[in-house]
Image: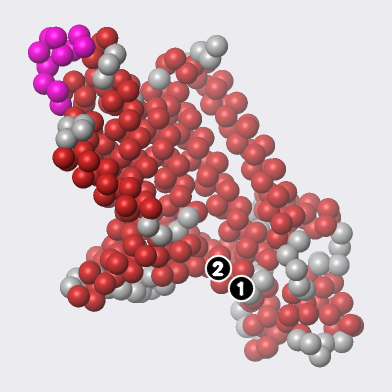
Amino acid sequence: MNAVLKIILQRLALGLLTLFIVSIVIFTAVNMLPGDFAQAILGQGATPEAIASIRRDLGLDQNPVTRYLIWLGDMLRGDLGISFAQLNFQSNMGAVELKTVTDQIAPRFANTMFLAGVTAAIAVPFAVTLGVLAALYRNSVFDKAVNISTLTSISSPEFFLAYILILFLAVLNPILPAISNIYQGISFGDRLAATLLPALTLTLVVTAHMMRMTRAAIINLLASPYIEMARLKGLSPMRVIVKHALPNALAPIINVIALNLAYLITGVVVVEVVFVYPGIGQLFVDAVKNRDIPVVQACCLIFAGAYILLNLAADILSILTNPRLRHPK
């Protein structure tokens, strides 16, 4: 148990170090974007004094190292700052109540997590079941049909799959809404209905990876001596796979599931834009268009944190399910 705890602490330390390096990369990349936000607010007719005043108010006149340290300190205290778009709106419309970046991101992140949860609830059991059946009936018509279907779905762009689903499930057969209209106070049933089409699109995208990894990991174990022994004992093929092969194939399956769950949080930008889904991906696109640096930086850091956290969870679960990984050579 101490060895497992030591490995977990090492992975946590590596995760924090990775997140620190990623924060430097994010800050540098965002601040290297061309253009000037102060100039964009005031327009082409702005005087140099007015531009300098706004840059001083926003702290943009300080050197990059100082701004990074201030930003990092605020992030550690949970203060993501004020959105530049909010400041722009206030300067044009007069005194209005400003929303912090946290206030803007929190409901969007909750929506994205709901979408990811619905997708995972459909995709993970569906993909693992397909993978087990494809391994059980390998080289059969069923196996070939599943492989062709999943390869076709993963080879198609996300927006193409989204429009195909909209055509069949919202236009020709109006079963589900084509636009994800989610608002405050919406009931769970309406929220689920509005989320199903983007969730089905993401399911088509992520199922192939998980199904093929499950199939390959199980087939790789079917030639093992203990599997032969189970067969000689007269166990049914399904029981041999589910009881003996699948538990030992969990490590690579967990890894690929974790990577796909990370994609459901960080890679949903296209799907959210197509369905006008009010998630963090849609907010990120709007922030980039408006050069809203605090929101862009916060979104990028959340994406990076989600990837690191889910990879860390995958590593820990793999170690717990495969004792050999606790004693690397």
Label at residue 289: 1
Q: Is residue 268 magenta?
A: no
Image position, residue 82 (x, y; %): 66, 68
Which residue is labeled 2 in the image?
285
Magenta-highlighted residues? 228-238
Assess disc 1: are there few (<14), some (14-19) or many (≥20) residues with their C-alpha within 10 Å of its C-alpha: few
- Report which quarter residue 227 is drawn in: top left
Image position, residue 17 (x, y; %): 67, 37
Check the image and report above or below for 24 versus 277: above
Check the image and report above or below for 241 versus 265: above
Main SS, magenta region, reads helix
Relative horizontal placement of residue 129, taking residue 157 as reference (left or right): left
- Residue in the image at 61% along x and 73% along y: 289
- Residue in the image at 53% along x and 15% along y: 328
Task: Measure how far apart labels 1 and 2 are at the Cα level.
Answer: 6 Å
Image position, residue 172 (x, y; %): 20, 75
- Asked if the residues shown at circle 1 and circle 2 are in contact, with their CB atoms under 8 angstroms apart, the answer is yes
- Residue in the image at 30% along x and 20% along y: 221
Check the image and report above or below for 169 versus 320: below
Q: Please name the amino acid that badge 1 sits on.
A: Lys
